[in-house]
Image: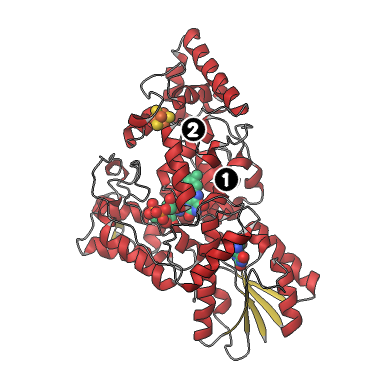
Amino acid sequence: MNLIFILGDQLSKGLSSLASANKTEDVILMCEVHAEATAVKHHKKKIAFLFSAMRHFADELTQDGYTVRYVKIDDPLNTQSFGTELERAAKTYTPECVLITEPSEHRVRQLVKTWGDLYGLTLEQIPDDRFLCSPSDFQEWAAGRKQFRMEYFYRTLRRKYDVLMVGDQPEGGAWNYDKDNRSPAKNGLDIPKPYMSVPDTITQEVMAIVEDKFADHFGDMLPFHYAVTRQGALAALDNFIETRLANFGTYQDAMLSGEPWMFHSHISLYLNCGLLDPLECIRKAELAYHAGAAPLNSVEGFIRQILGWREYVKGIYDMKMPTYRTENHLGASRALPSFYWSGQTQMNCIKHCVSETRENAYAHHIQRLMVLGNFALIAGLHPDEVNDWYHLVYADAYEWVELPNVSGMVLFADGGVLASKPYAASGAYINRMSNYCGACSYKVSVKNGPKACPFNYLYWNFMIENQEALSTNPRMAMPYRTLSKMDDIKRSAITSDAARFFKKIETNETV
Ligand code: FAD
Ligand code: DLZ
Ligand code: SF4
């Protein structure tokens, strides 16, 4: 018999390690372990979501006729790590071979490599075929290119999977409709309610255990409305396609106070743990376009996130690890301010994004990128601290997707491997795309002094501090031209405002 080890982000019936499973002989091992829940101290809602999804998946496999050894977090015999749980199961079953679909995270891949010798087991790692671009196909695409750009990678996958194509040409004549996807939203916009499941007894049991065992972890457990089964995840996807996809593109970058969900899909946590398959999401959106239920700018925009960005960051991660984790191109060194945890700041945009993150283990892309991430970039926060925070707070966070987004897209710590320039912005961008500024103690129109929006002077301070590293980047030519026209008085107002702000953060004063 074989022992098939299924990890928490491998909850797919079509998983490669299950493909040749013999239901009458083989045993499936799944375990909830303390070591994983605290590798970074994950948000309580994320742990509850994943444990509940794992338990439901194990039940479904059992109903399908598999034998499942499922070890719960509060089982007194649980040794609380992947390796020791495998060892314990192997002692019980003495398998000929242990099969495991290649873990998504580099740290766990390294662990798996040690298990054969450590526990005297024959172990076979099987490639994970749930992505639309394999690591070797990505390397082939990347080979010989001086620069990687998501847009060109995305076009090869559009062609390969024949998505939104008319023959060899993109539907509508253009590959990308981003120029139509930058509308701000107004108060009173009719935003449909997101999909909401009601916690069943399994979820309720898990929620209580997590509240007890991980009480000191960040985040609110209630309200809990995430789906925890494939059926629920499909219902959430269908709800998005039917009620929000049509407006997804137009309001993709918009932020409104008290509207954490906007017109986004909220499916990343299901995709990343295996409850949804990327191609099925893409095909459903494409179908909606052909049925006339959603316009091209929305459908293309949504598909680009999954077929383009999601696959692209996975490719970069697999190609660049383990060194990607330690890169710090801009030499950023500041500690993460405490308001990333407490939300206690007068910066209204950050206050909203942190409190929604705490409540939902979710924030949408522009909140992550242009508010929380932008601040981390222009304040020069150390990549390790920022990466740990993002990995910890979001229910969809796994290192393969979190790290390239943070070190590559947000912090430019990889020196431009993933993105061609840093996404640095002053308060004007946040003001254009949200209604946060109207209710803020700071004034977005003021550039310097105690009342000025900190994003304004931190933006220019960032440009000054990183002039050597960034000014030769052609895509940064415009801001550096503007900077070159600033006189010394203006420059010193910027640097002294920034210094005053950083001093306050260091001494834990509210900013
Ligand atoms: P939608 O806006 O509805 O997009 C649809 C889907 O596209 C998402 O579900 C997701 O699977 C995919 N997608 C969109 N953007 C990206 C992207 N940049 N990279 C990869 N996939 C993308 N996404 C994660 O899944 N896990 C993370 O840990 C994560 N960390 C991030 C950290 C930062 C700093 C930034 C800027 C982005 C991060 N993202 C991450 C990407 C993106 O913000 C989330 O995928 C998205 O907000 C999830 O919400 P949604 O399902 O409503 O997405
Ligand atoms: C994220 C996570 C958490 C919090 N807990 C578990 C767990 O107890 N058991 C498990 O199998 N998986 C868990 N996961 C997901 C793993 O971290 C993820 O599968 C690996 O990092 C992939 O390499
Ligand atoms: Fe954020 Fe500045 Fe606007 Fe306040 S004024 S909400 S700090 S961008």
Disc nearest the viewer among 2 and 1: 2
Q: Secondary structure at mark 2?
A: loop
Q: CA distance from mark 2 to mark 1?
A: 17 Å
Q: Is residue 186 above or below residue 480?
A: below
- Residue at figure coordinates x 43%, y 19% from the top left: 451
Q: Quick check: marks 2 and 1 in contact, CB under 8 Å?
A: no
438 displayed left or right of 206: left
114 displayed left or right of 353: right
Position in image of residue 207 (x %, y %): 53, 64
| Rendering colour mode | secondary structure
Q: Is residue 293 above or below residue 202?
A: above
Position in image of residue 449 (x %, y %): 46, 16
Task: Please give the label number shown on residue 345.
Answer: 2
Image quarter hosting the N terminus: bottom right
Q: Secondary structure at mark 1?
A: helix
Which quadrant of the view contains residue 74?
A: bottom right
Q: Name the quarter showing ligand 2.
A: bottom right
The front one of 474 and 451 is 451
Task: Please give the label number shown on residue 389.
Answer: 1
- Residue at figure coordinates x 55%, y 74% from the top left: 16
Q: Amino acid at mark 2?
A: Thr
- Residue at figure coordinates x 21%, y 64% from the top left: 291
Looking at the image, tell me whether mark 2 or mark 1 is earlier in sequence order.
Answer: 2
Task: Please give the label number shown on residue 67.
Answer: none
The front one of 280 and 387 is 387
Task: Report crowding for label 1: few under 14, some 14 to 19, many 20 or more residues within 10 A (C-alpha).
Answer: some
Looking at this rendering, what residue extends furthest in the left direction? 292
The CB of the residue at mark 1 lies under 8 Å from ligand 1: no
Q: Is residue 457 at least partly visible in the picture?
A: yes
Position in image of residue 494 (x %, y %): 50, 17
Q: Is residue 309 at least partly visible in the picture?
A: no
Q: Amino acid at mark 1?
A: Trp
